Amino acid sequence: MRVLFFLCILVLLPSATLLAGVKSDAAREAAENLMKRFGKEVGEKGVQTLTEEISTYGTRYGDEAITAIRKVGPRTFKLLDDAGDNAPEVVGLINRYGNDAVWVAAKPRNLAIFVRHGDEAAEAMIKHPGVAEAAIEKLGTPAATAIRTVSGQNARRIAMMVDDGSLVASGKAAEILEVVGRYGDRAADWVWRNKGFLAVATVATSFIADPEPFIDGTVEVVKVGGETLVRPVAEEAGRAINWSLFGVTAVVSLGAFVAFRLGLHRHLNRREPSPKKAVDSTR
């Protein structure tokens, strides 16, 4: 057994040494890169000191940590130290989003939101910094999905509707936000214009079940006799067109009738002999 143990060591030791050498080379290359790009941030650290520091993070969090350090620079050290147990998630975040990830990783509140709700939350906070956080905290991933899909104006509108309770009043806030996540600004515009109607269960349910007619404007929500109704716009438009057509037809018919009577009257006047000619003819 002892012989077998030593044989295993002899086989594995070169591989471990080789891997350590590769990681050390990657750390040194990253250190040299940082010295060129971030000289002021690096300060008085030499290449060797910086290499050792980078190697420490590489050993602790893997080669991905060295890649993250190359992307964001020396501030990565503090980000990883402050993240504590969430450091591996921060490494992945930096490697996916680069410098944009700093906004999320550097703030404990933002980092907590990201760890809980994932990349969709990170993208929403990166795209709309300072707007998305409260909405995501209240309504979670659906809010993140919706906010990362829309423009700045609609991101602010969603945040306001979450804050004032308009979406929660519908009882279907998550489902409505999922619709916005699929259709983007068009759906967000409709929700903003009709947020008061969404408190009516039938309206919210109909919109979630088939949002396209609402978004495209082929159906509308109206109040009739104190009751909130969803009705086709095309039907009302059709009625309007029919009445317009009836009106035009009536006007044209009346005009034709008047013209006919005037023409007939002139024709008869031309054919009727004058009184003088009539007297002459009796002679």
Image: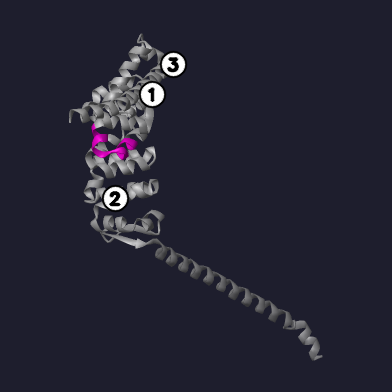
Q: Label for residue 87?
A: none
Instruction: Name the residue carrying label 3.
Output: 36
Q: Label for residue 176?
A: 2
Circle 1 packing at 10 Å, graded few (<14), some (14-19), many (20+), is: many
| Secondary structure under the numbered disc 2 in the rendered image | helix
Q: Is disc 3 in contact with disc 2, using a CB cutoff of under 8 Å?
A: no
Q: Nearer the viewer, residue 256 or 139?
A: 139
The amino acid sitting under disc 2 is Ile
Q: Earlier in the sequence, mark 3 or mark 2?
A: 3
Label 1 and label 3: CA atoms lie apart by 11 Å
The amino acid sitting under disc 3 is Lys
Can residue 193 be seen from the camera position used here?
Answer: no
Q: Nearer the viewer, residue 23 or 93?
A: 23
Estimate the x, y position of residue 83 in percent, counting from the top left: 24, 26
Instruction: Name the residue carrying label 1.
Output: 70
Q: Which residue of the protein is positioned furthest toward the bottom in this rendering?
A: 282
| Secondary structure under the numbered disc 1 in the rendered image | helix
The C terminus is located in which quarter?
Answer: bottom right
Query: Hey, which quadrant is residue 275 in on the image?
Result: bottom right
Circle 3 packing at 10 Å, graded few (<14), some (14-19), many (20+), is: few
Estimate the x, y position of residue 60 in percent, counting from the top left: 26, 25
Q: Residue at x 31, y 56 (%)?
A: 207
What residue span does the magenta drawing correspond to? 112-124
